[in-house]
Image (cartoon, rainbow, N blue to C red):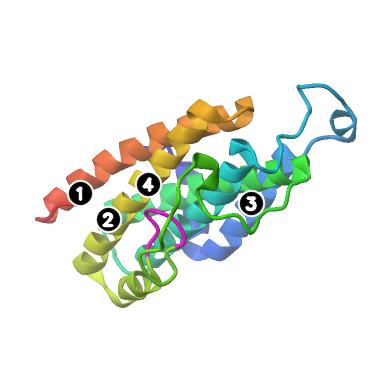
């Protein structure tokens, strides 16, 4: 399970939206290149092309992460279970930060944060949406998100854990593709870390579902 900074937790519980924005801004500041670095030349500073794995992954995973954070905020307010709320906090903290980093890199490369390309095209995959609002594999539909918002207690916990397991499986597959195929070390390292973190959380969620008498 991805480590969390416990000391910041009250801020998340008190103002999730504010913290999400703050994490994104901090990450953008951390990855924004200095003027001298931007002026450099050669392979070390060359921006990956718009059609690259690096750019496609950064765009798609930013969208994927955004929904994971949204689902985590929803379940945080639908249950009092400490373990589920802690998992939700960890996902919010980790994935909001990673999303900010990827958006910052896109900005530093001079690449748009979205494009008209089909999702997953950088992986050589075609994708047919399975329902309303499901923009990529693993993403919940609008109807599923509405069901999560309407649920409470154990019902909300189980639905969240099932939706997030599917979400993480698809995210880990996407990250594995980037970890092995991206040109930049930045993306390869980040993607490899995502694979490890999300696989660990998949195992954790399987245990949590088992304790609630169900399976992913």
10 Å crowding of disc 4: few (<14), some (14-19), many (20+): some
Q: Quadrant of residue 139?
A: bottom left
Q: Is residue 155 left or right of residue 139?
A: left
Sequence-wise, which precedes: disc 4 or disc 2? 2
Sequence-wise, which precedes: disc 2 or disc 1? 2
Asked if the magenta segment contains residue 86, the reply would be no
Which numbered dot is residue 208?
Answer: 1
Q: Is residue 16 visible?
A: yes
Foreground residue, 75 or 8? 75
| Residue at numbered disc 4 | 170
10 Å crowding of disc 2: few (<14), some (14-19), many (20+): many
Report how far apart the C-alphas of labels 3 and 2 lie in the structure.
25 Å
Residue pictured at 25% horizontal, 63% vertical:
159
Spot occupied by residue 52 in the image (x, y as percentages of width and height): 63, 38
**Residues marked 2 and 1 touching at CB (< 8 Å):** yes
Q: Which residues are magenta?
A: 135-140
Closer to viewer: mark 2 or mark 1: 2
Sequence-wise, which precedes: disc 3 or disc 1? 3
**Residues marked 3 and 1 touching at CB (< 8 Å):** no
| Residue at numbered disc 2 | 161
Report how far apart the C-alphas of labels 4 and 2 lie in the structure.
14 Å
Q: Is residue 17 above or below residue 101?
A: below
Spot occupied by residue 63 in the image (x, y as percentages of width and height): 53, 55
């Amino acid at each position: 399970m991805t480590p969390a900074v416990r000391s910041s937790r009250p801020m998340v519980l008190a103002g999730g939206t504010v913290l999400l924005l703050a994490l994104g801004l901090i990450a953008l500041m951390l990855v924004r290149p200095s003027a001298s670095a931007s002026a450099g030349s050669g392979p070390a500073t060359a921006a990956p092309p718009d059609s690259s794995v690096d750019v496609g992954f950064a765009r798609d995973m930013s969208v994927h992460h955004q929904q994971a954070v949204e689902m985590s905020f929803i379940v945080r307010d639908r249950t009092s279970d400490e373990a589920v709320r802690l998992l939700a906090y960890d996902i919010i903290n980790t994935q909001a930060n990673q999303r900010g980093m990827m958006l910052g890199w896109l900005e530093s490369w001079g690449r748009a944060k979205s494009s008209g390309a089909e999702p997953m095209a950088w992986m050589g995959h075609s994708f047919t949406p399975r329902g309303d609002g499901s923009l990529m594999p693993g993403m919940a539909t609008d109807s599923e998100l509405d069901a999560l918002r309407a649920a409470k207690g154990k019902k909300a916990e189980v639905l969240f854990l099932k939706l997030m397991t599917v979400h993480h499986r698809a995210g880990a597959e996407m990250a594995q593709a980037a970890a092995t195929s991206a040109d930049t070390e930045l993306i390869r390292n980040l993607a490899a870390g995502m694979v490890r973190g999300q696989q660990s959380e998949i195992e954790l969620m399987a245990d949590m579902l088992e304790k609630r008498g169900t399976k992913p």
